[in-house]
Each structure stands twice: as C-alpha cells, then as structure tokens.
Image (cartoon, grey):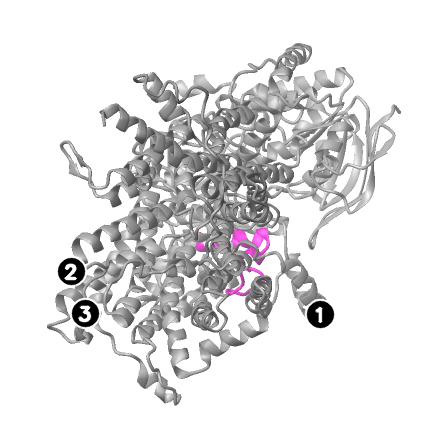
Amino acid sequence: MSELAIELKGIDKSFGLVHANRNINLKVRKGTIHGIIGENGAGKSTLMSILYGFYQADHGDIVINGQTVNIRDPNAAIAAGIGMVHQHFMLVENFTVLENIMLGAEESQILNAGITKARAELKRLEKEYALEVDPDAVIEELPVGIQQRVEILKALYRKADILILDEPTGVLTPAEADHLFRILGQLKDQGKTVLLITHKLREIMAITDEVSVMRRGEMVATRTTSETSVEELAELMVGRRVLLRVEKGEARPADVKLSVKNLTVRDSRGVTMVDDVSFDLRAGEIVGIAGVAGNGQSELLEAISGIRRAKSGTVLLNGRPVDVTGHADPAELRKCGLAHVPEDRHHVGLVLKFEESENAILGYHDDPKYRKGLTLDVDAIRAEAEEKIAAYDIRPPNPRLKTANFSGGNQQKIVLAREMERNPDVLIIGQPTRGVDVGAIEFIHRRIIEMRDQGKAVLLVSVELDEIRALSDRILVMFAGRVVGERAPDATEGELGLLMAGVEGPKEAAE
Amino acid sequence: MDFFQVFIELAQSTVRVSTPLILAALAGLFTERAGVFDIGLEGKMLGAAFAAGCVAYITQSVYMGLLAAILVSVLLSLVHGYASITQRGSQIVSGVAINFVVAGSTVILGEAWFRQGGRTPALSESGRFSAIHLPFADAVRDVPILGQIYSGLLSGHSPLTYLAFLMVPASWWILYRTRFGLRLRAVGENPGAVDTAGISVIWLRYRAVICCGILCGIAGAYLSLSAGAGFTKGMTAGKGYIALAALIFAKWRPKNILFACLLFGFLDAFAIRYQGFAFPLIGKVPVQLMQALPYILTVILLAGFIGKAIPPKAGGVPYVKER
Amino acid sequence: MSVPYAKLPAWAEYGLIPLVNLAVAFLISGLVVLIVGESPLEAAYHMINGAFGRGEYIGFTLYYTTTFIFTGLAVAVAFHAGLFNIGGEGQAYVGGIGVALACLALDRTLPWYLVFPIAILGAAFFGALWAMIPGWLQAKRGSHIVITTIMFNFIAASLMNYLLNKVFKPLGSMSLETRTFEAGGQLPKLDWLMSIFGLSVGSAPFNISFLLALVAAFAVWVLIWRTKLGYEMRTMGHSPAAARYAGIKEAKIIVITMMISGGLAGMMALNPIMGEQFRMQLDFVQGAGFVGIAVALMGRSHPAGIIPAALLFGMLYQGGAEISFEMPSISRDMIVIIQGLVILFAGALEHMFRPAITRLVIGLSPKTRDVAATKGA
C-alpha cells in the first residue's frame, strides 16, 4: 500500500442541532482517484468543506501527507496543497480568467508585476494538462465546462497536489463530463490525488480507484472500485435494497390535454434554453422528460406554467391557447385545469415562513371559497388544510406550524396535496422526490400513478433517470434545449444515456 | 464683467462645491464596490466636520482637526461595518441609524462643550486650511483666457480640494491596479470566490469600510476647516445624499464620479449664484428646481431612461458561508 | 438545513429581545447625558414626568403618538411586501397638500366633520401619489426603491418649498405657510376622552386624528393578515419567486403596497395641520417620517407592536421637550440620538444579543430545550 495523501481521524461536526458528520475516518492513497459517494444530504459536502477549511470540525484530526495539520481556513488548506472545485463555481463573473486565477495568489501588492508571471505560468499549466482557455476572456461569457476548467486551473496555479471536486458533473453534458474525466486521469498520471464527490454511481465505477460511501453523516464503507459493484454501492448508500419498481397498470391515453408546439425560451442573458420543443400530452398518461440538469427542462416547465415568458411557440391547454409569449398568468392557468409542482419547493412552491395552512392555498388564494366578505375565511382555510394533512399523512399534523419546521418529505407532500386535490386536468411535476426521504418517495410515486389512473395528464421532469423510467409511459429526452428523442420506458439506460449526451441529437431532431 | 469672467467664477465655485461631493462619493465607491451599501455618508461627514471643528479649535491646529475628523469618521464606519459585516444586519437600517445618532449628538455635544447654539467657535487662520496660491498666479492674472483659467480656476483652492481631485485617479489606480483593489472588487461581486481563495471576506470588507471612513473624514474636514470656519449644526445639508446620488449616477466608476460630482456641484453653484436667472427660451427656473435637479437626474438614471446603473452584484447582502 | 438559532418561545422572541435592544439603546443615551455632564437619572425623571406627569403632558405625548402611528404603519406595510419605504418623510410632506387644499377650500363653508373626511382622502391621495412613483419605478424599471424614495424626500422638500412660496402663501405674507384655517379646518380635541380618566387636556393638541390612527392600525392588521391583498403582499415579501409561481402580479402589488404605505404616511399630515397649527407650515413633518422607521422596527411591523412603539417615541418627544426645559444642556436633539440608537439596536443589530439570550432562555427551561431539539431534527 502506497503512502497516504489524506487521512481523516474521527471527524465530527454539528450545525446547531443537525449532526452533519459523525466520527468520520477516511484514508486516501497518493496518486489515486478516490470517490466519495452518498445521497444528497449524506454529509459529503460538509466533510469536504472541513477538509478545505471552510468549516472547522468539532472533533478529529486531519493528516495530510503524514503530517497532522490544523486547517483553520482555506488559506491553510491551500498551503497544505489542497485545491477545491466547488459545485457552484467560485468565480467572479465580470473578471477575466487571468484575474480569477490570480485572485488571492497575486504575489505582490501591485498587480502589474504579477500579471506577466501569472500569464506565463498559466500558459505552462495549460500545456502540461491540456487545459486550453483564453486568459483574457471574461468568465460570464464562457460556457460552464470552460468555467470549470478555470476552477481546476485555479487550484493547479496554487500548486495543489490534492484536488477535491464536489459534484463536478451536475452541470455538465455527458461529453463535457467525459472530457473532465480525461483531465482527471491526466492529473492522476502526474501524481496528483483526486477526491471526487458525487451521488452518481456510474461516475464512480468509471473513473475511481477506490470509493468510500457516506450515509446520514457517517462513513459506512470503503471499497476498491474494481472489486465492488453498482448494486453493492447502491445498497450501502441507501441502507437497504432499493427497488425502484412502482406497481402500475397499462396506461390508457385519451384526448390531448396539453399540446406544446415549437416552443422556444431564452433566459435573461438571451441564451436559448428551450429550442423549438414540440410534444403532446394526453389524459391518462405520464410523459417523463429525462436529461442532465440544465438542459432546458426547468425553463420548459416554467414556460408552460406561465412563470417564464417564452420567445416563440404555442401551447394549447385543454384545446385553448395559452399566451406563453405574452402575459400568460399562472393564476389563470390554474383555473383552466393546470397544476404545477415546481422543482424548487423552498423558494417557489412554498413560503417557508408561512403557516402550513397558508401554504395550502398558495396560488389558489383567489378562490371565493376562502373568502368571507372582504376578508379571508381563516377558519375555512385551516379546516381544509387539516383534511389534506390527514389525506396525505403530513406530519406533524398541525396546520398552524411554520412550514420551515416540516421535513423535506412533508413539505413536498404539502405542495402535492395542494396541487393534486384540485382535480386538475394537467399536472406538471418537477423533481418530485428531490431531498425527500425514502418512505415519502414511495408515497409520492404512488400518488402520481393514481393521478394518471384517474385520467390526468402528467408531465414529469426529473434528473433521476431511475425515477423517470419507473413512472413514465413515454420518455422524452432533452439535450441542449431540444427534445432529441422519444423512447418507451423499457429503453435501456445506455440508450437513454446516449440521447442525454446528445450523441444522436441532431439527426432525431431533424425529423 | 465679461462672459468669460463669469464662467471662471462659476467654475471656481463649482470646484469648491464639488470637493466634498467627490470625496464622499469616492468614499462610497470603496465600500459599495466591496459589497457594503452605505447611506450613512451624510452622518459620517457630519460627524467628521464636527470633530474637525472641535479639535481644530482646541488645538489651534488644522492638522489635528483633520486627524480627528478622519478618526471619528472611521469609527462610525466601523460601527456600520460591525452591524452589517459582523452582525449581518441590514445595511440600510444601519446607515439610517448612524445618520440620526450623528445628527443628534453633534448638536448635543457641541452645545454642551461650547454653548454657541450647536456651533463650534469660529476658527482662526491657523485652525483652517488656507488656500494654496500656485506660483505666478498673481502675475498672470491679467493674461486673457489661459491666465484667467490658471489664476482664477486652478489656483487658490484649499489643499483638500487638490487632494480630492487627485483622489480620483488614485482611487482608480487602487481599485484597478493593486491587489487590494482586485480583491475589493471581487468581494463585491462574489464573496464566495474571495473566501475560497483564502482571503478573509470580513477583514477585506472592514478595510473597504475604513477607506470609506477616511475619505468621508476628509470630506467632513473640508466643510468645517476649508469651506467654513468651524462647525455649524447640520452643515452637511444633504451633501452625503447628493454624493450617494452621484455615485449611482456614475455607475460606481471613479472617472464618472468626477463628472457626476462636477455636474451636481455646478447645479448647486449655479442655483446659489443666479437665483432668478432667466434662461433663454425657458425663462426663469425656480431655484427649488435647480436644487432638486441632482435627485431628479439620479432617479431618471436609475429608472434606466439614460443608460443603466447596475450595482455590484453582492451589494447589500451580508456574506454567509453556504453549506 | 442550517439552524442558526434555536427557536425561542414567543415571550422571549417578541418581548425579551426587543426590550433588551431598547434597554441598550437607552443605556447608551444615558452615557451621552453623562458626557454632557448631567445626571441620566434626573433626565429620565424629567422625561417620564414630562410625558405623563399631567393631563396636558399626556395630551402632548398622545399627539406625537398619533403622528408616529401613521408613519410607523406606513413603513411596516411596505416591509411586509419586502419593500423598504424610506420616503415616509416626503410622502407625509406632500400629503399635507391634500389637507391644506381641503381646508383652504372648505373651512369657511363646512363644519369640521365634513371637511375632515375630505382632508383624509386628500392626505392619503397625495401621499399615495408621491409613493406611487418610486413604486412604479421599482416595479417597471427596476430602480432600487430605497434610493428613489430617498431622492423623493429631497424632491418633495424642494417642491413644497416652491408651493408654499408661490401657491399657498397669502399675498404679502413673509413666512412660508398657508393662512390660518377657520373653524371648519380645525379638528376638535379629545378632551372628553381625557376627562373620562379625570384628566384635563389643557393646551395639548391631542385631537380626533388619534382615533383615526387607531382605526388605521386595526385596518392595517386586517389588511395584512386577513385579506387576499395582504396575503399576496406577504408572499411577495417572503419569496418573490413563490409569488410569481402563485400568479401574484408583482408589479401591481409593489405599486399598490407603496400607495397604501404612502397614503398612511400622508395621513400623518392631518395631525399637525388640522389638529395643531390650523395651517400648513414649512417643514411641518419634522422628521416624523424617519421616526416611522424606528417605530416599525421596534414594533416588528405588527400594529400591536407599532402602537406601543409609537407611544414610546411620543413619550420621548414630549418628555424630551420637558428635559430641554429643565436641563438646558440637553436639547431636543437628544431624541434624535435615541431614535438613531433604537434604529441601530432594534434594527441593524437586532440579532446581537440573540445568541446570549437564546442560551439563557434555553438553559433556564428544560421544556424549551426539548421543543427546540425536536424542531431542529
């Protein structure tokens, strides 16, 4: 066994009453790619932040290259040879690449002296690791993949031997991810140690030498990658065998309820996020939209639900045109039978500071049944909230409790209860089980199937491919804003993966 | 008096009126580019003017007065920093609070110490900044145009005025050509980037706030040691807010600040000198309109009718490490 | 999820913390009194005595309270929608136009109880108008409301100066004010209310607009917590993204909220113009718009908190006048200091003592600790 680059001994960290890391022990060998895998909220990011000096552990030691070090702040981490590529890039968007790379490592009080040197060093690094990037380009004008490259260069510029990457592929296309993996392989060949944080099993299997699994703040196992399997890791991650098979009968698609034609959406910067998307959604079917996060799914949902203005295209809801390019009104759409469970329940679907009962009418607060004269009928609102709490087993069953005090799964049930109990014709759902505990996932999946069986048209967006495959009757794959293919739910993961990577994209779209 | 002479005089008073605006707007530039909004420029200037008046009178030294002004202004900045950086309180609320505390205490303390109705005693020559007369200013006074400009406009200002105008390129240089400036601008856009680069966000922002205090201190000292001969109650009279308006009008850029302050200073100087002046075509413009014009112009700019003022991205938001 | 502070019981959250913040503000004010060479205890005595010692004093205290209820409500309403209306001062000032116009036009022909409703509408209309412009600019043009409302305070000052000079000033008069209103422009005092408690209002201008302020406070409570509009305002204040999702029209709510806020600020003008001076004078607002910020922060933007906070500032203003009479070295500017300190400690530094208080409260009561533990989990 070769030397250890990192050894963590008994790391423990609590935030207030949340125990994020419990007695973590970890050994990472020099010159390897070591994966850390775990579900969202398992404590991976906290652990890495401790290693990078962003937080201090309550207990425990960090040993780097055989020396116990006290990592008080990122400076100490940098001095110990640790570099980190954050999930959300830590770049100054209106600075150039060079300025970003120099920031914090400027060498002298006056910039000019350092700039030439930095430029030369950057050139050398670019060559050594094949990481081309224009030093004078402004960050906000660069694509995400290149921005990530700048983050890696930042770490190398600071002479990092150990590179931590936190969920690096979340924002990348499969092609960009492959490129990243090649870079990581090169870094390893040069003797660097790479720590890869992810919740994607496929990445772990593809690239790591060893893998450690975290679950609920604890480090549950470390395996040599070549000696383990996806199944074993998945079981370690979740703690029991997950069977993402939902019982469901045959779909009985009926009339078209939602018809999207040539929809194009641009974001505030003018970048096309949804590009000429067309599809029909019928009553009694679930259409799943698969894709890597950031390929336009969010914008598609927002445009259909009237939150975001589309550039062009038409949408028919129940045969009636929706003014998606003008002043589509979410409140009006609700009245026409559209229900929307948004991707981000914390900021969009709920007001966390409201009482549960207040959130139970969000978006439907206009309904005359909640009104008594000129004022809101608070008693009626609370009574109805209690009914939904009972029907969806929301805990604790208290309509007057602040919504922030409910767990993720129960918060999601508050949103689902509100949107499903309205008997909508069309239900669009984004990320139904993100940050939701396992028990609630089963409940939510069952409810979605029930909605379909009641003859609702369901549009489902999820970045969890397994979820899409388990629930959908048809799968549309989005890549770079376009629908690049349609498949049946029994399509193989590999086939869908290729579509999500955009490999077969242009040809399909041209049809 | 010929037209050119009128122009020179107007320009001269524009320069005088603009001096505290430039200093205060640059002060605001340093903290706002670092992501700490400051509507307390007014209060800091007022506190500084008061401290300068008191100390210059007691010590009979203009430099001690200046030093005291800077000290008080920096202290007030640190209160703002403590509230908005360390305690992560609302930057606006903190600025408002400081303006009030200073407005009240300068009067109370001034009255308690000097009993002159909230004024500090009039300063003698040694307690004030005397004007600097550039070499040969008197000799060339009668040379048309160039001589008039030299002796009438360029010469004969307070040293603090020359300092204020020098501070414009100096601030530019500090912000765009030094390590401190690079980091300061970075922390106003994305404090996370600064933190992960191993630089303390808190200390960096405190330093920006201290820079603001120093400049506001000089601006305040100018009011009581140069423009006036001692402190009078409420002597900033909204200049801190005009400076704030100028800073926004300048879109947070040093060079633009110079022009914005000169413009607002000109409007003020014109309004004072030519009350009831009849413009060709428009006729008489009420002096109140002239006084309100800087604010109206800033509102129009903010509304995006003439260009768009985009504030630093992380401005007004306390930095919290995210998990 | 990060839990920065454990949840405190309501009495600590809404009682203890504001009280501690207030106490610190007063403590520092006491230090200023010491620096000036006077006794803070004596000052406190004169303040309390000056505010409540006699029926007349109480009348003055409640007169100021009336003013601050209006401006405090104005700031609070905007806070609920996530807007910081720092322009109450200018809105109250411009609101005076409505009062003055109503009185000047009708005071000789109509009795006060007919002029009053018209003046209320006028005050609210002009105040709302002055707040609507910054609201519209924020909603449609994205200009920062804090900056625009500050600018509008100055613009209002210039505008009113001009109007008093050129429009309202009677011919031949030197001072910048309207003529004195006749009976129809004078609000009756609330001496009957005072006499219930066996007190005499004396020369204090405690008038019927106090009752209007209380009605306004109740109306604001109903608006915020019991109407659809209030629900939409609060949704937007907490989460603009959720508001958009819910189909709430952001621009409309911003403009309406600002108009309500400005209208409340404008109604403040009734109290000094129709209730005390019986004419509109230059600078009649005298900083009351800014006191409203302190009142709203102290009162946690809830009418039930705003009324006592306004009373506190009423006491400061009236008691402060008494102090300056008894102790000449402490002028009424002392109030401005206290006001600033209250804004600082109840606003910008409101969380400063929270960790210590949380430790104390949770340490004291085991029951609270359990509750906190289950909620955090």
- Kindly tell me whether residue C347 is visible in this rendering: yes
The amino acid type found where label 3 is placed reads: Phe
Q: Please tell me how crowded label 1 is: few (under 14), some (14-19), or many (20+) other residues with Cα within 10 Å.
A: few
Which residue bears the numbered disc 2?
A: C170
The amino acid type found where label 1 is placed reads: Leu
Q: Which residues are magenta?
A: A392-420
Q: CA distance from mark 2 to mark 1?
A: 67 Å
**Rendering quarter of residue B8:** top left
Which residue bears the numbered disc 3?
A: C181
The amino acid type found where label 2 is placed reads: Pro
Q: Nearer the viewer, mark 2 or mark 1?
A: 2
**Earlier sequence position, callout 3 versus callout 2:** 2
The image position of residue B96, as x and y in percent, is 47, 52
| Residue that sits furthest to the left in the current view | C109
**SS class of the residue under badge 3?**
loop
User: Do callouts 3 and 2 point to residues on the same chain?
Assistant: yes
Residue in front for this viewpoint, C377 or A450: C377
Q: Is residue B234 covered in magenta?
A: no
Q: CA distance from mark 3 to mark 2?
A: 12 Å
**Residue at position x 67%, y 21% in the image:** A108
Which residue bears the numbered disc 1?
A: C364
Q: Is residue A40 above or below residue C314?
A: above
Chain bearing mark 1: C
Chain bearing mark 2: C
Q: Please tell me how crowded label 2 is: few (under 14), some (14-19), or many (20+) other residues with Cα within 10 Å.
A: some
**Residue at position x 39%, y 50% in the image:** C246
**SS class of the residue under badge 2?**
loop
- Kindly tell me whether residue A284 is visible in this rendering: no
Q: Quadrant of the C terminus of chain C?
A: bottom right
Chain bearing mark 3: C
